[in-house]
């Protein structure tokens, strides 16, 4: 309930707010629904729709054991240094430009089945957006900063600040965390002072 309240879905009395009443129309986790609706006001609904759809399916990249270096190099071509979310958008946009071709996915070590499912999810969400008269304009590839604002509007409680060498700490819960090796931020060459993450993944570390 606290998360719903900080997202603006509940009022101070615990009832649904106007925003919350719109969020429940989407079969999504509350932050994703908030992000989708907030993006409409920033005129980047089309981009956030694609991101939400990709976040609703399994990992879109695959890494065969006998072709790790080749697949890593292919994935890095899609990296947007500022964001893994924008990297997903980049992949989806490139696949769409390729005519949703399965062979394109094979060449770029992308899971066609996952992207196809994301396309179905996007179509379903688009129908719901249109039913609620939620705009789904595109901001274009030169204005992706507004997409990052939409992401922050929904996942601000997952904000973390740099604490040490490669280590972050959640600004609300003080939970320590690190960049995942598969993240587009991991090989930047510098460590951002602050990050917003979608989820924490528990990993083992060898000593």
Image: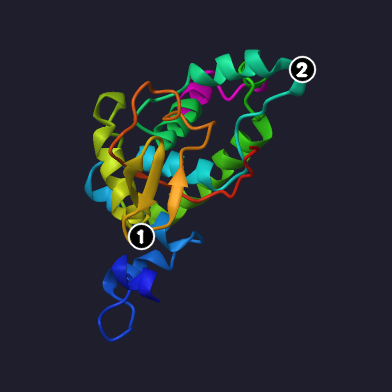
Along the line of sight, which residue is nearer the eye, 69 or 155?
69
Image vertical order of residue 189 relative to residue 205, above or below:
above
Q: Which quadrant, please, contains the C terminus? A: top right
Q: Residue at x 58, y 43 (%)?
A: 120
Q: Which residue is drawn at 64% across and 13% down?
A: 70
Element marked by disc 1: loop
Q: Distance between the residues labelled 1 and 2?
A: 48 Å
Q: Which quadrant, please, contains the N terminus? A: bottom left
Judging by the rendered image, the residue that carries numbered circle 1 is 132
Q: Quadrant of residue 172?
A: bottom left
Along the line of sight, which residue is nearer the eye, 79 or 133?
79
Q: Is residue 37 visible?
A: no
Q: Quadrant of residue 168?
A: top left
Q: Which residue is drawn at 47% across and 51% down?
A: 125
**What mark, if any, has residue 66 been given in the picture?**
2
Image vertical order of residue 100 relative to residue 38, above or below:
above
Q: Can residue 96 be seen in this view?
A: yes
Q: Which residue lies furthest to the right in this view?
A: 66
- Could you tell me residue 193's position as x and y percent? 28, 38
Which span is picked out in magenta? 93-103
- Could you tell me residue 157's position as x and y percent? 34, 58
Q: Which residue lies furthest to the bottom in this view?
A: 13
- Could you tell me residue 179's position as x and y percent? 46, 38
Q: How is colour applied across the structure in the image?
A: rainbow
């Amino acid at each position: 309930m606290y998360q719903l309240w900080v997202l603006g879905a509940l009022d101070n009395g615990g009832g649904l707010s106007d925003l919350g009443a719109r969020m429940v129309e989407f079969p999504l986790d509350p932050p994703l629904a908030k992000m989708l609706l907030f993006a409409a006001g920033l005129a980047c609904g089309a981009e956030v729709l694609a991101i939400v759809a990709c976040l609703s399916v399994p990992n879109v990249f695959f890494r065969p054991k006998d072709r790790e270096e080749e697949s890593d190099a292919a994935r890095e071509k899609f990296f947007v240094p500022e964001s893994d979310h924008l990297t997903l958008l980049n992949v989806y946009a490139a696949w769409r430009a390729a005519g949703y071709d399965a062979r394109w996915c094979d060449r770029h070590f992308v899971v066609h089945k996952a992207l196809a499912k994301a396309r179905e999810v996007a179509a379903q969400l688009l129908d719901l957006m249109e039913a609620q008269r939620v705009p789904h304009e595109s901001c274009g590839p030169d204005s992706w900063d507004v997409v990052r604002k939409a992401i922050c509007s929904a996942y601000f409680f997952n904000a973390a600040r740099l604490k040490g060498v490669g280590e972050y700490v959640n600004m609300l819960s003080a939970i320590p965390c690190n960049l995942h090796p598969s993240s587009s931020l991991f090989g930047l060459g510098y460590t951002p002072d602050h990050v917003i993450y979608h989820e924490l993944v528990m990993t083992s570390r060898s000593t």
